[in-house]
Image: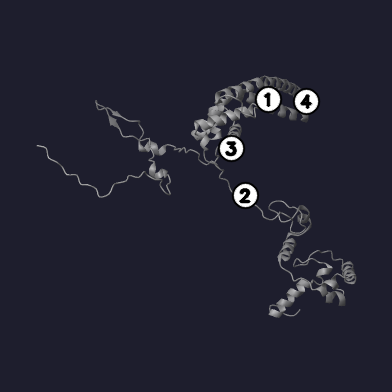
Amino acid sequence: MACAIAVPKLSHPITYCPPGEARNARFDEYVGVRRKLPIQKATFDAEGVAESNGIDWGDFGRMGQFQHKLDSGRLSDTPSWATNDKQLRAVLVVYLERRAGLMKPGPGTEIQRLQRAQATLIKQTASFQVSLDKMVHRYAGILARLKETPADTEALAAKHDCATQIQNLDTVLLFNKDIAGKVLRVVHCYYRMGYTSVQVETETGLKPPHVREILWRLRKVAALLGFHNPPCRRHKRVRYSKPRVCILCGAPRGKGYKFCDACGSLYNHRAASAASTAKKKATTPPTPKRHAIVSSPEFIALFDVWRARTGDKRRHCKNGHAICAANAHVGDMRREGRYFCNECQRAYQRQYASGLVTAR
């Protein structure tokens, strides 16, 4: 006997929304990933024989552990074009065309353009081979010359240059034979497997500087095609808002120094520091009457007479003020013909008025 089951009707419809993006989501490798250990539990087959890898916790404690992380310690993240086959193919084709001297993309598909660039590079191999043979004969002549005169400096320098050229030409000849495959191998090992440039050398035979140079050129080609390259995570460079000049004469100085070479060797650093500190302090501008007096020829003549009589060749006083007619105390110079710094005199008067010092 069939019975009817009453299904309750909903008062409002149910809407199923798609899942949204998680806010502040961060991959935690210590929570989301469980590290695998080499220790395994022993298992027994149907006949009762134990099967295990033979490693216990004592062996594991004596083992050396190495954890490999992708992009560990690199200055920038992996670019998107390095993990996208279509974009990587476009970057590789343009890279080979520019290496072959074809600055503008030719007609045809990417495969045809790649084959055309590869054929151009193979044609250039003949001229490279001729240059390599000449360098080898020249290197043999230099060795024969050094065998007769080992202390010949010109021959030693020529030997070094010739050996460098032979190494470069040999690398170019080997690299151009299968350049597309080697470049793809470099990108795969460096970006997709997380190898360093030294580890890529063991896989491809290319030296680490050559590997880094290839990757740098690929990044330039990718930027030319409009692909995104992650920025480098480098320390911010210190940008000096003021020019690096000497604090005494204003001439250009080296980084980390306060004085130029001339001032650093002629003057005492303590006196120069005091002079720079005094220059930074705001001084009271001279009144029109004082300016007229100290700039008059009679007053300047009195200052020259004092300097000739005393033979004082100092340029700054003990507080760092410049010794000149403009900074001389007018009363002392006129009455006694003696120089005294006007700025130091004003500072002493302020201290005396405040009770910090007593009368001299």
Q: Which mark is residue 147?
A: none
* Dot 1 crowding, Cα within 10 Å, few <14, some 14–19, many 20+: some
Q: Gap in Å between the C-alphas at discs 4 and 2? A: 51 Å
Judge the density around disc 3: few (<14), some (14-19), many (≥20) Cα neighbours within 10 Å.
few
Mark 4 lies on residue: 149
Query: Dot 1 corresponds to which residue?
Result: 166
| Mark sitting earlier along the chain (2/3) | 3
Q: Would you name the residue on which mark 3 appears? A: 223
Could you tell which of marks 3 and 4 lies nearer the N-terminus?
Answer: 4
Task: Count up the numbered dots.
Answer: 4
Q: Quadrant of the N terminus?
A: top left
Quadrant location of residue 165?
A: top right
- Distance, label 1 to label 4, CA atoms, is 23 Å
The mark closer to the camera, 2 or 1, is 2
Position in image of residue 164 (x %, y %): 68, 28
Q: Residues within 10 Å of mark 2 (few under 14, many from 20)?
A: few
